[in-house]
Image: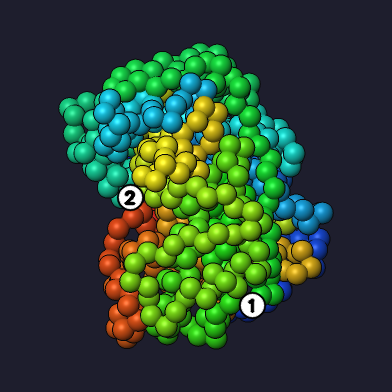
Amino acid sequence: MILSRSLKLLGAGLAALALLNATALAQTVTAPVRAPAPQAGAKVPGFVAAANLMAVEAGLSVLRRGGSAADAAVAVQVMLGLVEPQSSGIGGGGFVMHYEAKTGKVTAWNGRETAPAAASPTMFLDEDGTPLKRPDAIRSGRATGVPGAMAVLEAVHGRYGKLPWNSLFEDTAKVAEDGFVVTPRLEDQIKRFISQDKSPDGAKYFSHPDGTPLRTGDLLKNPAYAGVMRRMAAKGAGVLHNGPIAQKIVDRTRAGPYGGAMTAADLAGYKPQEIPPLCRPYRAYVLCAPSPPASGVGLLELMGLLERTDIASRGPTDPQAWYLFAEASRVMYADRDRYVGDPRFVSVPVEGLLNAGYLDTRAKAIGQTARSGAHDAGLPPGAKLVGIDATAEVPGTTHFVVVDGEGNVVSMTTTVESFFGSGRMVEGFFLNNQMTDFSFRPTEKDGAPTANAVAGGKRPRSSMTPVIILDKQGRFVGAIGSPGGNNIPAYVAKTLVGVLDWGLPLQQAIDLPNLVARGTDFNGEAHKFAPGVLEGLKARGVEVKRGAGEESGLHGVILRADGSIDGGADGRREGQARVLVKP
């Protein structure tokens, strides 16, 4: 009976997805491209793009009740934590970009997890100084940082919310109680998780009583999560930082193997941060992204390098365009990997990395053919030499965009780090493994300190780069972002080039092949490039290897001159993009 009901629900969801895709295609094909935003104050339809249809509907439900983008963002996140737990959740963290239509002000918010106060630079080294094996580190108690996703959303809601906080959780609570249908992507992740993982919490949650894993169409209930939703609605995000739930988080992280050092004081002392948004011109536009420890500075450096090439006069079938993108990416990653960390602990030369003269110099590193070895980091103005950090951020992130009827916007990238975080659960939600985003080694072989070394109270470097796009008058043009670990800046930059340089509708820009060039590696969707592109790249010293790394999950929106919405969702996942239709 339950399975039959589940399959009907799944079928309805797939039918809705097919209809949505057909509608989106019809809209984007006819939409004008490279058009300026409408005048400030113009009414726009509400919009939500996220990685799961139920999360999209949760956000739209809030918008229908007159809620703001900040209100809807809360509802989207808590639903994603239930139905897409492999990617984000209330036990994780994230970065938020917010655009206020009335004032044109862009704000950035840091909800990144923090290391416990007792965390040490050598916490991921064994007795002889060798780094722990990554799978062991990920599932350890040491992997979890103090979560910040709900705390930062509460701060954003306190500034920009319209509806009461306690009205934003009941939809998710009911779904958790009644159950939701396991999707094909979730089934795939469950299979990998149970077959490769040693975490009993997640294995129990995702298995039938006889031990067989859940499959597509099965109904998954989570009454414990429903209880957390109602406690959070009544008492705020603080229920994760003080009281019984907080103590359970501490106890679960301190358990072996490799128990952590988190304390109740660490959780109680967590504070989200409003941080300076980084806004820089790009051709006729202005791109805004979060400052370190996020990788907004890396994305803006990459776009600045590309602006110094002729990529805009080319297109997606031109191998030279992709060559320029690859080499500019390698130059950017060389700088980002060396310099970006938590600015409260290390000096990050943000202004130097984006300095026009420095970008002119770095652009000269892009030759006629690809450099045979990795590009060296540059020395931007104000930089202090630190060790190179090649941290391999692993999959487990999501991105969503919300636009409300007044034109306010939230662009949020949020994560638990690996798929299902550390695999440890408390009250129906997964704990993050964000501490493994730190460098496992505190120094390089030459003794230079690593900018992204572990320290108590420090936030690890992140590749997350949620973006707000403005025109030169400060009016909203669009928002975009993606999961993908270290690949995120490349995924976002590719899409920006497609929309802003090549004039593509957003969905077509998202669908462009992914190409991630970092160090000596050129990874991407080799099977998706236009005929002749791979051969042209190879002639220039770039051989694209298929796969490697997390797939993109790009979600975004472009507001066209007539006020219409050009939305996009990444077909590489189960993304949805929907415009609000009021009854």
Name the residue that disc number 1 marks. 34
- SS for tag 1? loop
- The quadrant of the rendering that contains the C terminus is bottom right
Nearest the viewer among 314 and 332 is 332
- Can residue 44 be seen here? yes
Say whether residue 456 is left or right of residue 159.
Answer: left
Q: Which mark is residue 185?
A: 2
Please tell me which of labels 1 and 2 falls first in the chain: 1
Identify the amino acid type marked 2.
Arg
- Residue 206 visible in image: no
For the point 33% across and 55% down, the residue is 549
Residue at point 24%, 35% (across, down):
197
Where does the image place residue 564, in percent across and percent down from the top left? 66, 69
Q: Check the picture and name the quadrant holding the N terminus.
A: top left
Is 454 situated left or right of 149 in this image?
left
Any mark on residue 218, and which?
Answer: none
Label 1 – label 2 distance at C-alpha: 34 Å
Q: Residue at x 50, y 24 (%)?
A: 116
Disc 1 marks which amino acid? Arg
User: What coloring was used for the rendering?
Assistant: rainbow
Crowdedness near tag 1: few (<14), some (14–19) or many (≥20) residues, C-alpha within 10 Å: some
